[in-house]
Each structure stands twice: as C-alpha cells, then as structure tokens.
C-alpha cells in the first residue's frame, strides 16, 4: 500500500510540474513581443541615436487577441516615412496566421538647448546674458533648436521671444548690423585724438565683423570692424 501511495504522490507531483508548461503554450501572440518588434524598428532608424534617448512603444487595445505567429514578426513604416517624436508603426504576421496591427512609438531625446533668460524684443542681438543652456526633450521641438551662439556675427531675434522660450532657428537671423550701400560713420583713434568721417559699406556685415568701407571724402576704401549698426572702427 505504501508503494502504491508513493506512486500516486509522484504522479501528481509530476502532473503539477507540467501545468506551467501546458499553460505557457498560449495560442495568442503576446503584447510584449509586438511592442518589442515596433520598438526595435524605430530604435534602429530614429535620428537621435547620438543623444541621450529612450524609445517607448505604446500599449495595444485590451481587446486585441491575435493568434500566435508561426514565424518572426515584421515591423514596418510606410516607404520614405519620416520618423518623428511619435510615429505609428505596423507589426504583421505572415507565417501561419495572417494579421497586422498598428501602435504608436515615442522617442524622447535629450540635449542642451538655448532658452531666453528674459523677454527679447525683435531685433535684439543674442548674447551670453540673454540666453542660457538648458536640457530639453529636443525630439518634441518640431522647429529644431540652437545649442550655442558660436556663428560668425551671432544671432539677432527676428521676432519677439518670450522669457523661457527655447530658441529655434525660425526665431533668429544672422545679426547683420550694416547693409551693403549703407552710409556709416568711420571712426579712428590716434592716441587720445579721435577722428570721424562718412563712408559707404561695401558689403553686409555683422557685429564684430571686418568690413570694407569707401571713405566719401577721400574716395579711398578702408577696412574696419563693425562696432554698432552705424559705426565702423577703422583699422590702423
């Protein structure tokens, strides 16, 4: 009897061990596998891979019940599709059961961007006191962003910019201070003596740039540095 009882106990022990294996043979495709396929598709193609970023696949409708695919899942986006912060990705099965489902995938990418430290009126020249560098989710900035002021001539606000706003390329223009053909004041200093005269700019120039100016009195062309929107300091 003892042997029979032991045999019965061993039978039920083995049967209980087998239950998880039976339960794991789920006839439905797991949501996790679908989301991973969509996530990996975007992770390999989005334009912010060189930045600190994360890729998050959206959840499926709780009513979705898709048969398990007999082969690997295939994720796709339309030909020539532009991957943005939020992109719809298709995942399909072509082996055994045939089905296609769509879900959103979001990319959050972080980088330092310049923001205005105070309200900037149109025409303001941007400098270190008017902007600061702040980490932002730049994948959400549809108009792009600017991360430094290091361009020849700097930037000038092409429209009013509110305090705290991220500086985008469409908010600024090259800080051209003097236009070609514009009448300017030439200024030069000899020791403690300053001399000024009138001239005409030969080209556009930004603050701090070198520019050629024709001296209207002598007819000679001299070179100087743009000091303001009306003043050029002659190089001696």
Image (cartoon, helix red, strand yellow):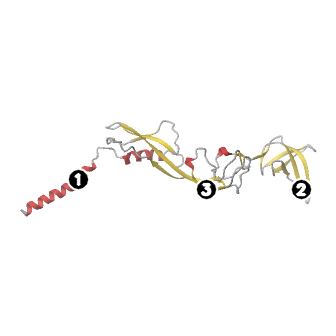
Figure quadrant of the N terminus: bottom left
**Percent x, y for residue 4?**
8, 60
The quadrant of the picture occupied by the C terminus is bottom right
Pointer 1 residue: 19
- Whichever of labels 2 and 1 marks the residue nearer the N terminus, that label is 1
Residue at numbered disc 3: 134
Left or right: residue 1 compared with residue 176? left
Q: Distance between the residues labelled 2 and 1?
A: 95 Å
Residue 10 placement (x, y as % from top left): 15, 59
- Disc 3 to disc 2: CB gap under 8 Å: no
Left/right placement of residue 152 relative to residue 211 reads: left
SS for callout 2: strand
Q: Which residue position holds label 2?
A: 189
- Name the side, left or right, on which 168 lies relative to 233: left
The residue located at (51%, 38%) in the rendering is 81
Residue 138, compared with residue 193, is above or below; it is above
- The structure residue drawn at horizontal position 29% and vertical position 46%, both measured from the top left corner, is 26
Report which quarter residue 171 is drawn in: top right
Between label 2 and label 1, give the one nearer the viewer: 1
């Amino acid at each position: 009897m003892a042997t029979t009882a032991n045999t019965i106990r061993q039978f039920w022990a083995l049967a209980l061990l087998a239950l998880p294996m039976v339960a794991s043979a789920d006839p439905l495709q797991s949501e996790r596998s679908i989301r991973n396929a969509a996530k990996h598709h975007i992770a390999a193609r989005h334009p912010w891979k060189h930045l600190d970023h994360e890729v998050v696949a959206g959840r499926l409708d709780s009513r979705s019940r898709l048969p398990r695919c007999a082969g690997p899942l295939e994720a796709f986006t339309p030909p020539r599709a532009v991957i943005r912060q939020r992109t719809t990705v298709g995942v399909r099965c072509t082996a055994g059961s045939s089905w296609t489902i769509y879900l959103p995938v979001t990319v959050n990418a972080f980088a330092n961007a310049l923001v205005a430290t105070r309200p900037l009126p149109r025409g303001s020249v941007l400098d270190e006191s008017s902007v600061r560098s702040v980490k932002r989710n730049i994948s959400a900035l549809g108009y792009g962003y600017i991360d430094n002021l290091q361009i020849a001539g700097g930037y000038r606000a092409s429209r009013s910019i509110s305090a705290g706003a991220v500086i985008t390329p469409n908010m600024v223009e090259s800080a051209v201070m003097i236009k070609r053909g514009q009448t300017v004041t030439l200024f030069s200093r000899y020791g403690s003596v300053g001399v000024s005269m009138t001239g005409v700019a030969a080209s556009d120039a930004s603050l701090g740039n070198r520019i050629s100016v024709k001296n209207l009195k002598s007819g000679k062309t001299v070179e100087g540095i743009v000091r303001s929107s009306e003043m050029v300091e002659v190089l001696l």
